[in-house]
Amino acid sequence: MALVDLIMPKLGESIIEATILKWHKKPGDPINEDEAVLDIATDKVDSEVPSTTAGVLEEILFNENDVVPVGAVIAKIRVGAGSAVTHTPSASPDVQPEYEEAKLIEEVPYQPTQFVVNASQPGSKSVIKFYSPLVLNIAQQEGVSMAELETIEGTGQDGRVSKKDILAHVAAKASGSYQAPIASTITHEPATQIEPAKNQLAVSNGSQVMSSGYTGNVEIIEMDRMRKMIAKHMIDSQNTSAHVTSFAECDVTNLVLWREKVKKDFEKREGERITFTPLFIEAIVKSIKKYPLLSSSVEGDKIIIKKDLNIGMATALPNGNLIVPVIKNADQLNLTGLTKQVNNLANAARTGKLKPDDTNGGTFTLTNVGSFGSIMGTPIINQPQVAIMAVGAIKKRPMVIETPQGDSIAIRHMMYISLSYDHRIIDGALGSTFLNTVSKELENFDGNRSI
């Protein structure tokens, strides 16, 4: 008999730690090789950690919600038929699992903020509640709010709400036997502790949140885990980089007409739809080659210029969150290759099949605010990059056209583009020059090119 270590896997070059979301097994449970043992999360994607061997789960070394460094032993598995569950230490081989595929879930466990609810119970502790994706989906379909979900008595492990519990609750509402409980009043910490400032609520982790008193007809929605990480990432970026945004207007008529001309034949030949995104990325890559400082990062007082042009593309998920898959070595791909990479990564993001490496290593980011109808935007830099470009909606507008015969007015396809850049190393002259270079690449698109 021997014990095998289950290791926190490496989830990409920039990931140094992960949070344990949920254990699927408990000590004493049998485990098959490659069977999911637990769910973990990073600031990029969520994934399952499979067992590297068949056996019995001997010991769990970290709890749910613990942040664990990559490479740490998170559990021990006893291998060998008929092994008994003990806790006797034993030498074990250093086995690190191969990470195969991440699962970007569209519904994440609900994690309410830990407010101090009852000042008369100073010794009580707030408990973070978790709900499985199945329970959350049922709640959404049946119109059960998060506040109402919290009132359901759970019969699952650690008092969690199970499928049976929420279905019973829905049935009780339908029969009219359900009575909504009176909401608890949120109060401040006991007087023995430091009183929060006016209009603020005390939080169990020591931070403070502003409150307007929740007057009037309001609905309180807790951020899911991914939204919290996005919020932190955005604030950290604002606190790191000196953001400046420049704008340009470009005539993309040639590009629009060319795509309209070739899209049917391209889809029939390649089995892929050609969107504007690979065309934008192609123009960005050509421009970065002229101004390589746009593909760099800042480390202390050093500027690291990235020779590998890895272009991230911001992708909206069905649940409203955002993720940025990365097209690696975009400068080495032709337009067909870019199109296939763009479509594959976008589909993987929306179906929860991105791998951790798919979101790592970006050197420049493109975001398409025009896909939602916006004509322009001021995006926040995706750290540790130093620039991000936004493209707005393409609109037909009357424009003045200069010709050797004189000026004329014509209907053209126009688009605004914007570039947010880190003013610590990119001055306005360089930022504006780069943006105008991208604009000229798009305007001078060859409408007769073949693909």
Image: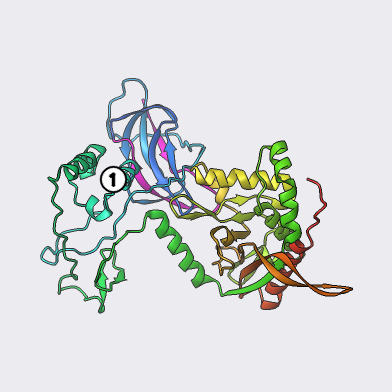
- Residue 41: % across, % down: 42, 49
Examine the image and state in which quarter residue 288 appears. Answer: bottom right
Tag 1, which secondary structure? Answer: helix
Q: Nearer the viewer, residue 424 or 266?
A: 266
Q: Which residues are magenta?
A: 1-26
Q: Is residue 133 left or right of residue 125?
A: right
- Direction from residue 100 to residue 65 in the image, left or right: left
User: x%, y% of residue 40?
Assistant: 41, 45
> Where does the image place residue 283, in percent across and percent down from the top left?
73, 59
Nearest the camera: 375 or 83?
375
Residue furthest top as drawn = 81
Q: Which residue is mark 1?
A: 142
Residue beneath the point at 29% across and 36% down? 26
Between 107 and 46, the one lying in front of the other is 107
Viewer can see residue 333 = no
Name the residue: 64% across, 67% down. 417
**Quarter containing the N terminus:** top left
- Is residue 382 shown in magenta? no
Left or right of residue 283: residue 423: left
Amino acid type, callout 1: Glu
- Crowd class of label 1 (few under 14; some 14 to 19; many from 20; radius 10 Å): few
Residue 164 sits in quarter: top left
Q: How many marks?
A: 1
Q: Is residue 40 above or below residue 269?
A: below
Q: Position of residue 292 (x, y in %)?
A: 72, 64
